[in-house]
């Protein structure tokens, strides 16, 4: 830790400020900030000057690593690390490749519980500070909330972006960022790949959808800026994604290369506003998209590898001088055109700073090293990205406070106040789409015996579930008698028949759908339940678009995510403990005329007072 202390003193020296003060020349606040920034940059440049080319290259990579511990993972995780990375554990990965960041995943067994995560983070930082040139690591994850969450309970979990868009409150978005950021920082995660700044104008989008705040660029921009401020107030680097905009595609870039057909004018109007707002809010990082955008770059290179898009537009036109990070380099959308050794080189030439999770680190690392050796990439180019990355680490306090404490975890993660805030925010997101005969709110007198059926999609990390059980538990707590009959996303004719039989004698049925689609089995389930004569309450567990394909229900609610916090809030709304306050942040199109909305943006009912 001696290296850490001496480096900190180097970075925080204020010699220039002291000289001016000694001359009796007081500095205005902005000049003082500029002097401090110049002084910090001087210290960071001195660090960079001490580094070898290999150490500089390593700092540009953010990598996955298996295991709950930096030095003593389980044997199965050691085996996975050896197979995929050629190292045993995180400490060995850092020692060999000098990586500048680690990304946590639940499937990599990094995120069992808050104390374990904090200990893993401390082990990673200890390995970083044990290097020849000691440097803290930027530990990151995808904690979008809603559909994409890596850190689960007992951490506080909030509604996802589209639900937040339905709530429409910038104050709530800032609160989400502030609380989530504080909890992430307490366990050592100092970069979050959130918020999603994509404007979801395509209901068929298979990869963004409810991860977006909505379809109105101005509304999305307002929410993005608020969440960015909240995260960065808690010393966590926010990361807007996926530049230049992934909201209008029918292809998942994990498996293919989407093509965005917007004109340049449409991009300015639809896709650009949230990224402009994020930059104006002082965002630390922006993530690229593995998409082709011919109007912005006719070469049809993916945006991640496009100098016209990343340097010409993001850097020069939008004026962003923060960290640019790729989306995962293991995704097919960026690997279709070039080999894994060339992708990171082309990304750096395009204007990227951080290279996220290539499938084979040795191939990617050696590709960059070869490009430097040949002169294709200059060492000065590496230094420019490295300076941005180190500025971010310094700004978010990693040089001053690389380690976290047990006390900090206990004082911050999943506190009663944080959980209460999430519950209150969730209540403001639930959207009532239909209630023509006043079926809702349900009352214990008229609807005491309830049947709960429908889809049980796998819950996002650590949010318990499944949805039918969460709904039943919440209703039981409120005094209702519930029976649960999960029917899945593709209910068979026999399952539909069983559900209709189970509805006999019930006062109402609650049916959850998940990406129902036109003419599908879930649509037949809802119609059959409606034909039984028992009142049916429909919950769209993910996409609000489901309601357009259904018939036979007496009331319909959109929850936008199937996490516990959102489902429990929906139960409070459908039983009248809370009033529906959400409004659609996207239009629900008519199935027979997609250009016409069945329900427009801003639609949402409430109960009569």
Image (cartoon, helix red, strand yellow):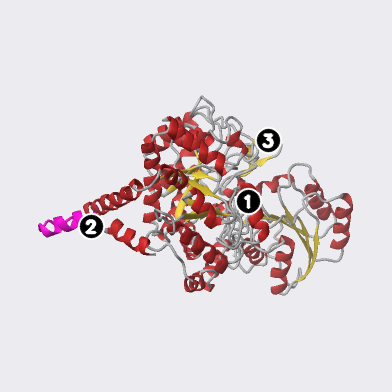
Q: Nearer the viewer, mark 2 or mark 1?
A: 1
Q: Residues within 10 Å of mark 1 (few under 14, many from 20)?
A: some
Q: CA distance from mark 2 to mark 3?
A: 65 Å
Where residue 21 appears, as percent x and y from the top left, is: 14, 59
Q: Quadrant of the C terminus?
A: bottom right
Residue 82: give its label: 1
Along the viewing direction, whichever of 446 and 151 lies nearer the viewer: 151
Where residue 72 appears, as percent x and y from the top left, is: 59, 63
Where residue 245 appears, as percent x and y from the top left, is: 52, 39
Where is mark 3, residue-wise?
Answer: 593
The single residue placed furthest to the left in the displayed view is 23
Task: Looking at the image, tell me whether mark 2 or mark 3 is earlier in sequence order.
Answer: 2
Which stretch is magenta? 15-30
Residue 570: give its label: none
Q: Residues within 10 Å of mark 2 (few under 14, many from 20)?
A: some
Disc 1 is placed on an element classified as helix
Residue 39 falls left or right of residue 203: left
Determine contact: label 2, label 1, CB under 8 Å.
no
Where is mark 2, residue-wise?
Answer: 14
Where residue 494 appears, as percent x and y from the top left, is: 89, 53
Q: Within the magenta stretch, is there residue 101?
A: no
């Amino acid at each position: 830790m001696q290296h850490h202390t001496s480096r900190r003193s180097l970075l925080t020296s204020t010699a220039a400020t002291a000289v001016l003060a000694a001359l009796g020349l007081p500095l205005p606040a902005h000049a003082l900030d500029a002097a401090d920034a110049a002084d910090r940059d001087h210290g960071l440049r001195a660090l960079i000057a001490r580094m070898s080319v290999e150490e500089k290259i390593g700092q540009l990579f953010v990598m996955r690593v298996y295991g709950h511990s930096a030095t003593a993972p389980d044997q199965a995780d050691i085996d996975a690390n050896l197979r995929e990375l050629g190292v045993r554990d995180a400490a060995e990965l850092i020692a060999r490749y000098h990586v500048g960041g680690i990304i946590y995943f639940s499937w990599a067994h990094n995120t069992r519980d808050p104390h374990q995560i904090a200990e893993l983070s401390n082990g990673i930082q200890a390995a970083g500070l044990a290097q020849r040139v000691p440097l803290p690591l930027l530990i990151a994850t995808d904690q979008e909330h809603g559909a994409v969450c890596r850190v689960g309970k007992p951490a506080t979990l909030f509604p996802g972006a589209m639900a937040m868009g339905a709530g429409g409150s910038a104050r709530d978005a800032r609160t989400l960022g502030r609380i989530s950021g504080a909890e992430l920082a307490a366990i050592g995660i100092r970069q979050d790949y959130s918020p999603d700044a994509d404007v979801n104008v395509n209901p068929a989008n298979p990869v963004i959808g409810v991860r977006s705040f909505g379809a109105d660029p101005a509304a999305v921009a307002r929410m993005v800026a608020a969440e960015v401020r909240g995260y960065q107030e808690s010393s966590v680097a926010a990361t807007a994604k996926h530049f230049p905009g992934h909201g209008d595609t029918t292809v998942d870039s994990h498996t293919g290369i989407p093509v965005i057909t917007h004109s340049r004018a449409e991009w300015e109007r639809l896709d650009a506003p949230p990224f402009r707002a994020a930059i104006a809010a002082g965002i630390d990082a922006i993530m690229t998209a593995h998409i082709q955008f011919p109007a912005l770059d006719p070469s049809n290179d993916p945006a991640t590898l496009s100098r016209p898009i990343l340097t010409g537009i993001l850097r020069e036109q939008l004026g962003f001088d923060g960290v640019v990070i790729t989306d995962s380099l293991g995704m097919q959308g960026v690997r279709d055109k070039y080999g894994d050794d060339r992708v990171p080189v082309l990304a750096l030439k395009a204007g990227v700073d951080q290279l996220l999770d290539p499938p084979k680190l040795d191939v990617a690392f050696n590709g960059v090293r070869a490009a430097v050796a040949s002169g294709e990439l200059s060492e000065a180019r590496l230094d420019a990205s490295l300076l941005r990355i180190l500025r971010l680490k310094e700004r978010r306090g990693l040089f001053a406070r690389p380690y976290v404490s047990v006390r900090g975890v206990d004082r911050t993660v999943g506190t009663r106040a944080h959980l209460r805030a999430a519950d209150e925010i969730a209540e403001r997101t639930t959207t009532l789409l239909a209630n023509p005969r006043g079926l809702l709110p349900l009352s214990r007198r008229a609807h005491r015996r309830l049947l709960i059926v429908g889809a049980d999609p796998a819950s996002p990390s650590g949010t318990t579930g499944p949805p039918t059980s969460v709904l039943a538990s919440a209703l039981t707590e409120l005094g209702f008698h519930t029976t649960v009959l999960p029917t899945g996303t593709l209910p068979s004719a026999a399952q539909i028949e069983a559900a209709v039989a189970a509805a006999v004698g019930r006062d109402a049925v609650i049916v959850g759908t998940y990406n129902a689609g036109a003419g599908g089995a879930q649509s037949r389930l809802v119609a059959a339940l409606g034909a039984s004569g028992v009142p049916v309450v429909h919950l769209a567990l993910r996409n609000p678009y489901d309601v357009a394909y259904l018939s036979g229900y007496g009331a319909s609610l959109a929850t936008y995510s199937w996490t516990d916090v959102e489902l429990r809030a929906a139960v409070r709304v459908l039983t009248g403990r809370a009033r529906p306050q959400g409004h659609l942040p996207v239009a629900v199109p008519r199935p027979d005329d997609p250009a016409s909305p069945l329900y427009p943006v801003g639609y949402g009912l409430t109960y009569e007072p």
